Image (spheres, rainbow, N blue to C red):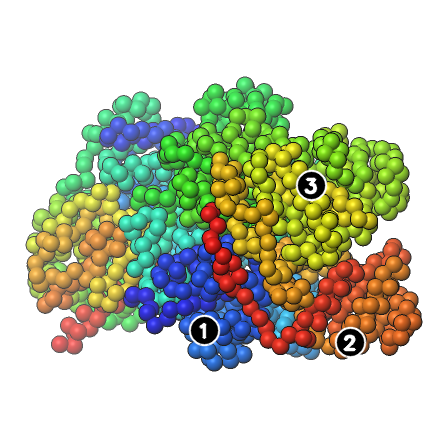
Amino acid sequence: MPKRTDIHKILIIGSGPIVIGQACEFDYSGTQACKALRQEGYEVVLVNSNPATIMTDPEMADRTYIEPLTVESVSAIIRRERPDALLPTVGGQTALNLAIDLADSGILEECGVEMIGAKREAIKIAEDRLLFKKAMDEVGLPMPRGGFAKSWADAEVIVEETGYPAIIRPSFTLGGTGAGTAFNPEEFEEIVRNGLAASPIHEVLIEESILGWKEFELEVMRDLADNVVIICSIENFDPMGVHTGDSITVAPAQTLTDREYQQMRDMAITIIRKVGVETGGSNIQFAVNPDDGEIRIIEMNPRVSRSSALASKATGFPIAKIAAKLAVGYTLDEIPNDITKKTPASFEPTIDYVVTKIPKWNFEKFRDAEDVLGTQMKSVGEVMAIGRTFKESLFKGLRSLEAVKPLRLEDVSDDELQRKLARPNSQRFSYITYALEHGWSIDEIYRLSRIDRWFLDQLKQVMEIQEQIEGKSLEEIPLDLLRAFKEAALSDRRLAYLTNRTEDEVRAHRKTLGLIPVYKRVDTCGAEFESYTPYLYSTYEEEDEAQPTDRQKIMILGSGPNRIGQGIEFDYCCCHASFALHEAGWETIMVNCNPETVSTDYDTSDRLYFEPLTFEDVMNIVDVEKPTGVIVQFGGQTPLNLAMRLHEAGVPIIGTSPDSIDLAEDRRRFGSLLSELGIPQPENGTAISIEEAREIAVRIGYPVLVRPSYVLGGRAMAIVYDEETLDDYMRAAVDFSHDRPVLIDKFLEQAAEFDVDALADGTACVIAGIQEHIEEAGIHSGDSSCVLPPVRIAAEHLDTMRHYTRRLATALTVNGLMNIQFAIKDDRVYVLEVNPRASRTVPFVSKATGVPIARIAALVMAGRKLKEFGLPDELTVDRFYIKSPVFPFRKFPGVDPVLSPEMHSTGEVMGIGETFGEAYAKAMTGAGINLPGSGTAFISVNEADKGQAALIARRLKRLGFDLMATIGTAARLREVGLDVATVFKVNEGRPNVADHIKQGEVALVINTPLGRASHYDEQAIRRAALQYNVPCVTTMTGAQALVEALSSRTTQKEFAVYALQDLHNKAAIGA
Amino acid sequence: MESKSAILALEDGRVWRGRSWGAAGESTGEMVFNTSMTGYQEVLTDPSYAGQIVCMTYPLIGNYGVNSEDPESARPWVEGFVVREFSRIASSWRSEETLDDYLKRWNIPGVDHIDTRALVRHIRDKGAMRACLSTIDTDADSVIEKARNSPPMENRELASVVTTKRAYQFAAAGAERFHVVCYDFGVKTNSLRELSQAGCRITVVPASTPASEVFAMKPDGVFLSNGPGDPASMTKEVEEVKQVAQSGVPTFGICFGHQLLGRAFGGQTFKLVFGHRGGNQPVKDLRDGRVEITAHNHGFAVQADSLPPEVEVTHVNLNDQCVEGMRHTTLPIISVQYHPEAAPGPHDAEHHFQRFIELMEKRVAS
């Protein structure tokens, strides 16, 4: 069937901020959908609250709205744009839920908007477990025993049927929020009650345990002619019980016979037809009993998912792109396969390699969280690796993770080892290896871990190779053995460690022996047809298919797995560099290992190497491609850490020189540069002993900001007020050495903080954006909301920051992007940090100013001059743009959700408004915070904040809020004549403030830290607020901003929405 | 790393050195590749692979071992087996033996640890050709020579090698509705199972059975099975098939059977460059536009423009437009070039057995 001509304008809903369970895979799918639909001539309207996405670039859609993903906001967009259709299946669970809410609200009917891809009924069947179970019963497909509970009483009845362990999953939550496994009645009650609270419809599913069964997934596609194809099968390395987002997963399935696989395939086809997903992709999960092959259907996602992004990257079949085309009426046989060109998309990809996805966790950032994996997803990112064997793909994947310090286990007791093997955790891999090394049998490890013996044997094979090497000198290792070592993707670095040599020596030796990798293509068809797409991976085999060109080319090093502190913002920059350089006539080569991203779409760059970002892997590609230039500035810390070594190895790094990067990163060099330039920075020092640390702290005065060298996202960064805490910190919190001293800075209390992004080319410098943090200094810049333009700063300080920025750009000969963090205290401007690279705020600044600064920077790095772009000295904005973070605290029970110098946010949203208040209200709403219109405001602040608290309380009262406070704060409020109720602190008796929050009597919380004594109290308040989704601010500047937001909501009559194309319809910048 | 080495040489002089697995020894055959990611046991035991050395494009083979439920015939037929890496252990609740032991037991030599993708690309570009796999001869030139001296697939007759020596019965599952005679050119068990499940009692007869003997059995329908070799080598059998077809008895041919029907109608068959072998081939039904994902194993095909007007092409392969199904416009004869019985492969094409049943139903009714 040809495409539909009765629809012209299609609304696509994105997935909002990056959160655990919903990451940049939906930027990838949404971007593909936008591109595909526009190619077909449709007008695309896009809404997403996340400014760090490629999909929200104004050239990706015809109309782009960076607005909250709420019924109110999207309804306003629908009324304004009048789209004919809504595609709800490419924006994750968020888009699907919102689409259902929109349908239920009547707006779609009112405005004549048709849902394409999946209809409301199909979504409901797939999403509502009761309906889904009924549907499965009707076609005779087995699901786990169990049922739905709307109350604790229901739950008690259901558990009779399921027995223990029982699995509990709240309905309609993301990434399995609130889910868990109960082994006894006590745990059962706790999880059920929490789950009922977490579910927006107060419902949990309770099921028999199929813990330890094998888990499989199929990616299915269907078209309007009812053709159904399976794109990819995936087998989980981890058994049932571990969320698939937290499992190592392998494509294709490794341990299914054809008979079993085809049975699963038949079931998948039956399911997609029964549920009624008309077109597009779905993901179906199965559990298989390893003892007798019994199958259970676990669930179906009627949309593109994390797994479909993985399946697309794993097979070269672009699921989201094809899904978009199917949604407008094409059938699979009408769409050509991009890679082979000659064959159609109506086939099932076959692959001749193995793909492994490995999750990346950030448990170290949530110190009070238990490192246990279960049905609630906790990983923040993932890597994918391709190899010709499972061993190669697994170990390549492990290398891609950039584990700072691999866990080297010593003397683990049998008891502990048993426990660690039996209870899944983020380090289980190390424990399995340890067990194998210590002679534990595969059967024993299998019995405990339920990880398939085939996988365990593969690990054992790699252990055996390493054992044969141990004790040999590098030159003694026979070529065959060395080849086996490299075929298992073990690193040169590992070999250097085993043979007590340097990595460079190993590399040189290997090259002398001619032991170098070749590159194979991902071609969807197992080499049956010729591939026209250079989508490559390395392997140690015979024939090379890289076929490098002799064009002028630039290689861009990506940012690897997402993690807190290094997320989608850097992928955004890498993609922009690639787009800009490609348009300017360069051949672009992308290197990255993150399957979620737009950068690893084979469509993004001219050539794609899906490889780890280590020195060894990058050098191997450089040897083959011989690039004209390599960009390390856009992928965050990952490529930046390689800069110096690559430079020393003769790799042509373009942009700011590795020496300048080092100058900015090296504390001592940077300190002397600043004093030379006469730019103040907080007093500081570096320490490699407790004594030294104490001396420095005394010299510069408490409080001090302490942190280890070379870390990301403020890892282990802390504010220390006294010597005792400093000692604790030095003793327990961090490792330090001569190379990596602890950095100690004077902490500027209650200073205002600023982020400045700038472009420079060695002579000129354009200030792209001066962003004011809403929270004061001491909160990690990634965790602070920030506003463009600044709102509370004297003009002279702005000038000082501009002046310093330009001087630093010149002094560091910045060529490309730079980011500077400033603090202002007592009318003095300090430089906190300079990063001569793309920063986290680049996409935000680009969206706010309408100037694609990453693109311009890439062209500058490739030799163009800033003046060619016709930019002013400083970019300006004509409204208020606010970036706000979102946090994953809900996923980590027991963790205190307080803001600190260590970054915890996973993503961000942007709010746009005519006033500060409007913009902030939108940012808050976008970040999932319900702004109350009325109710009771609870206030409890420290002595220093009480004056300001009184002002804020008065405004709240005027907005119609009742006041509630703890004794001290209440007294102060009464002094100024405010009517306020007094409540108990948590340790003062019941009912206390936490009880009031839990009973839904509190609409918002303002609570600034009072110091150590009340730490427990505050934590209880914050956790209660988090659990019951009550807005909670912990800084006075945050409270002020919140009040602005609240008052804007009450004064504004209509929800205003702005399309980027209207905001920035100035003459196009010559990028 | 202790294992022995093996050589795989092609007639055009390209050579791969890898590790020996399965049986030690030497064999020659036509070098072909299969792109199915599962189902190696079904591939090994498919008689259509007689005379061929098979390379699996999926690199890891043997993971789930071998069981006694999945074979497609009484024994493996491939001449040699080429994989990237075989699994030393078997992990499946149904496994009874490792694949390595199985190949040793059946005396089939294997080679692994070679760049199978390079091999596949070579065959794809240069075409299927003769090869020799040896674990005993270490001289590449000599192994190449052996490949060159082996019989070519063109005009090779192999049905007589794989066919049953005498006729046998395969009972209907449940009530018997029809009696079908199956010409065994190398039939796969699952075809018989499918027919049986549809209520057919099957008399499986040797490939050389004259049509007159078949008529004597008074069948409700005749099934022409898959099988190895060049259909052009089967002049005598084609004559018998022609008699069967013209008799008006409902006839269903698959794969080799389909090719013989093509020739019986007066059409030509030709050798494809490297054939279709795998489980992901898109076939379009030209009558309703539906696309089915199908299992293929054929190195020859029917030439579309050589067919007489009374024969309608019903199915084509979307990858290369090759004829995948035919129907006689006046006689109750249908055929498909691919494998509705799958095993290994998707079940999308299973309904063709039903089409055959319907032809028999009509015939009985009239």
Disc 3, SS: helix
Q: Nearer the viewer, residue A43 or A376?
A: A43
Kindly identify which residue carries mark 3.
Answer: A804
Q: Amino acid at mark 1?
A: Arg
Q: Position of residue A541 (x, y in %)?
A: 42, 32
Q: Chain of mark 2?
A: A
The CA span between labels 3 and 2 is: 42 Å
Q: Amino acid at mark 3?
A: Tyr
Disc 1, SS: loop
Tag 1 and tag 2 share a subunit: yes
**What residue is shown at x 39% (from left), y 28% (from top)?**
B5
First in sequence, mark 3 or 1: give its number: 1
The CA span between labels 3 and 1 is: 48 Å
Instruction: Write down the quadrant of residue A614 in the picture.
Output: top right
Tag 3 and tag 2 share a subunit: yes
Kindly identify which residue carries mark 2.
Answer: A958
The answer to whether residue A717 is above or below residue A645 is below
Q: Nearer the viewer, residue A728 or A964?
A: A964
- Is residue A459 visible in the rendered structure shown here? no
**What residue is shown at x 72% (from left), y 59% (from top)?**
A893
Q: Amino acid at mark 2?
A: Arg
- Is residue A514 visible in the rendered structure shown here? yes
Mark in front: 3 vs 1: 3
The CA span between labels 1 and 2 is: 38 Å
Does A837 sit left or right of A983 as displayed?
left
Q: Which mark is residue A250?
A: none
**What residue is shown at x 61% (from left), y 42% (from top)?**
A818
**Disc 3, disc 1: CB below 8 Å?**
no
Disc 2, SS: helix
